[in-house]
Image: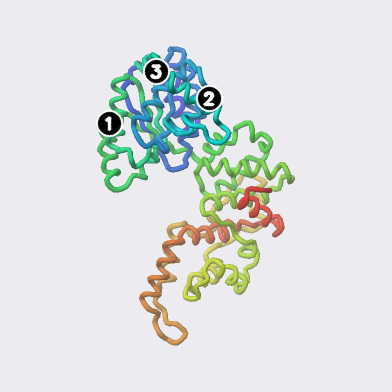
Amino acid sequence: MTTMKILEKYLINDIDGFLLNTNNNEKTIMISGAWGAGKTHFWQKEIEPKLSEKLKIDNKACVYVSLYGKDNIESIKNEILFKAYESIKDENKLAKGAISAFGFGSRLLSVSVGGVRANTSVVSDAVESFFESKKIDEAESFLADGGLICVDDFERKSKHINLNDLFGFIAQLSIDMNCKIVIILNSDVFEGEEANIFKTVKEKTINKYFYFEPTIEELFYSIADDEKYDKIDDYKKDILKAIVETKELNARIFIQVLDNLLEWFKKYNYDKYQFRALVLITVNFSKNHFVFDYVIFNNRDNAKLYNVLSKYYKDEGLYEIVNYFVQTLPQLVSKISDSEFDRYFDGDRTITPIAGGCECGDFLHQMHSDISKKEKDSNGKVKSDSYYEKLNKVFQDNKKIFYALYYYAYVLDIERGVEKEIFTKINNFVKTGIL
């Protein structure tokens, strides 16, 4: 059983699921994990639908609220109440959907914008009637004594909301309503005073802590098993292998990869090398917002490679940056033979993705050390401190790009098995979104 399935069973098992057990009312639960690891996807696809169905039997609400864009606690409270009512009564799907999309109190819910006058009118009327009626009492009853509220995007709240006040509101809500609250967040993003507040209130408020850490394979298949990807079902094993090579664990990027592959497959026949290149290019572009020229990889001629890299670093004083890639990178990487690579694709065996190269931290450390050596120029003079300060700034500002060039261009050999014309088409597709 996968770690995701184990967590799902623990939370909502029919007999003794933690979130269904009334003994856990008034408790606040935290699900934390790395940025992009799929926490929200896991909750919305695997937990919330099943949990809502079970709670609804007892007229208990299961409410999901994102804090993204919220700038006051009152709007959060109003959204919780409205969604609690609608989760049981389901009287106005349009209003509930609009509030989920725009947030409670958004001007889009109360004024006409462009061609959506009728829709916003319906939404605002539903909201107005809700707060002018006794529906609030019903909403509270749906939350009380067993309801559940999931608060997501904690780290993306507005700076206008005090973190200490927010935790206080949540803690009091769980007590007053005798309900369970689930907080989904990436705790590493808080800095400075907020980091200190978070540490303090977490110890006082959180009753149960779960760390969400799926494997790449678990996260991939939790997304790829969606029926819309059935057309590329036969190739998911190869797609996963390419994703594993990138060492990336990010649900949003996985969705981008699969969507791009699905669109590519509609126009071109399956080719394992094209699919692999499309995976790698999509992942790199999602993280670093640029694509590589084919000549960087396909032609190891130093002069041509230097000309290509010079496009990135045109300052002649930064010769060391360009020269490092031209002279050093090919020596750091032991390439995988074509026959070994074919066996990797056609069989069940695996290869070491790093392919004899350095890990990220090791490579960047070595690069910084090499380009920072105070060597003499062609006139026998040691270059100035200001020059090396400038060089260090370029290095610090472009760490991700340097590593991407190293890892995707040299270690993974991104263009392997793909002709220049197709490689260019893949690049253009990923950059523009148009095939």
Q: Which amino acid does label 2 sit on?
A: Leu
**Image position of 82 with respect to 368: above or below:** above
Q: Which amino acid does label 1 sit on?
A: Gly
Circle 3/circle 1 CB separation < 8 Å: no
**Image position of 287 with respect to 398: above or below:** above
Q: Earlier in the sequence, mark 3 or mark 1?
A: 3
Q: Which of marks 2 and 3 is nearer the N terminus?
A: 2
Q: Where is residue 146 in the image (x, y as percent from the top left)?
A: 37, 17
Task: Please give the label number shown on residue 132.
Answer: 3
Disc 2 is placed on an element classified as helix
Q: Which residue is drawn at 39% across and 22% down?
A: 81
Inter-mark Cα distance, 1 to 2:
31 Å
170 sits left or right of 394 in the view: left
Q: Earlier in the sequence, mark 1 or mark 2?
A: 2
Q: Where is residue 48 in the image (x, y as percent from the top left)?
A: 47, 25
Does the image show residue 21? no
Within the image, what quadrant is residue 193 found in?
A: top left
208 sits left or right of 100 in the view: left
Q: Position of residue 407 (x, y in %)?
A: 53, 58
User: Mark 2 sits on what residue?
Assistant: 94
User: Mark 1 sits on what residue?
Assistant: 168
386 sits left or right of 272 in the view: left
Q: What residue type is labelled 3?
A: Glu
**Image position of 307 with respect to 20: above or below:** below
Q: 10 Å neighbourhood of mark 3: few (<14), some, or many (≥20)?
A: few
Which one is closest to the eye, mark 2 or mark 3?
3
Which one is closest to the eye, mark 1 or mark 2?
2
